[in-house]
Amino acid sequence: MGGHTAIVTGANHGIGAATAAALAGRGCAVLCTFFRIGDPLDGGVPQAYRDYRAAGADGVVAQIRREGGKALAVEADLSDPATPAALFGAAEDELGPVDILVNNASGWLADTFSAAGADRLGRSLQPVTEATWAQVFRVDAMASALMIAEFARRHIARGGRWGRIVGLTSGGDLGFPEEVSYGAAKAAQTSYTMSAAAELAAFGVTANIVHPPVTDTGWVSDAVREAVAASPTLIHIARPADVAEVIAYLASDAAALITGNVITLR
């Protein structure tokens, strides 16, 4: 995959960091974008997860460079509509034209229509408000759409004939109880990505969504492990690197015939 340039959002930890490393290991230059988030204390969420979300991406980039790869870290607020153009500009200036986009970043929080103060895993719940809606939708839905739009504009303008877009989703057809704004925003991102698969196919672009299983990005507690073990539908607790391998495959030449799919991992 040498000669390609990727932008991976949310690349300071978890699936994003693992994806950046997987793509770089295959020869891609990678812009690792991230935004430090200071989550409040929550008895249902391990401290490690809050630490990861507050970290930068310098360590990810340093590891890629130590292994002979090419990478750049850029902190950027995806809730700002000006950010996509700035990120693509930085990537083009330092790494080359972007032909792989991984929309991984999330403004995740847990909100609810009910009066519950905590979910079944002991994590704090907030009531749905304009603020909770905006935090999630501006990153998971709006930013993903604007990143795809910027990708498409530049790709078409330069006469690009090869491109890959991969997004990540969560929730399901019956919504996402106790994470209602997050589930709705991910559904919007899925729709944008499926539209991109149809509209950009003529320009050599594939677009797919990956639905990971429960993935231990630092938030998996003993309560989560017990819930997965008791579930008839949740089979694995994956490592970020496991999911990253699927994303890297979708970004490869071998996946040229895979587009317009939601790929559910279990």
Image (cartoon, rainbow, N blue to C red):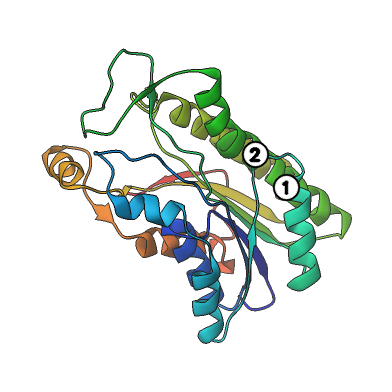
Q: Residue at x 35, y 62 (%)?
A: 242
Residue found at the very far front of the displayed protein:
41
Location of mark 1 (residue): 83
The quadrant in which the N terminus is found is bottom right
Determine whether label 1 and label 2 are within 8 Å by CB: yes
- The answer to whether 57 is drawn above or below residue 144 in the figure is below
Q: Amino acid at mark 1?
A: Thr
Relative to 154, is 122 on the left or the right?
Answer: left
Q: Is residue 216 visible?
A: no
Picture coordinates of residue 196, whole percent (x, y): 67, 42
Q: Secondary structure at mark 2?
A: loop
Front-most of residues 25 and 160: 25
Q: Amino acid at mark 2?
A: Ser
Task: Specify the label residue 122 is tagged with.
Answer: none
C-alpha span from label 1 to label 2: 8 Å
Picture coordinates of residue 144, whole percent (x, y): 63, 42
Q: Is residue 25 visible?
A: yes
Q: Secondary structure at mark 1?
A: helix
Picture coordinates of residue 22, whole percent (x, y): 48, 70
Categorize mark 2 by other alpha carbons within 10 Å: few (<14), some (14-19), many (20+). many
Task: Specify the label residue 79 is tagged with.
Answer: 2
Picture coordinates of residue 265, whole percent (x, y): 35, 49
Front-most of residues 55 and 237: 55
- The answer to whether 94 is drawn above or below residue 84 in the figure is below
Q: Residue at x 26, y 27 (%)?
A: 119
Residue 179, by quadrant, is top left
Count of labels shown?
Answer: 2
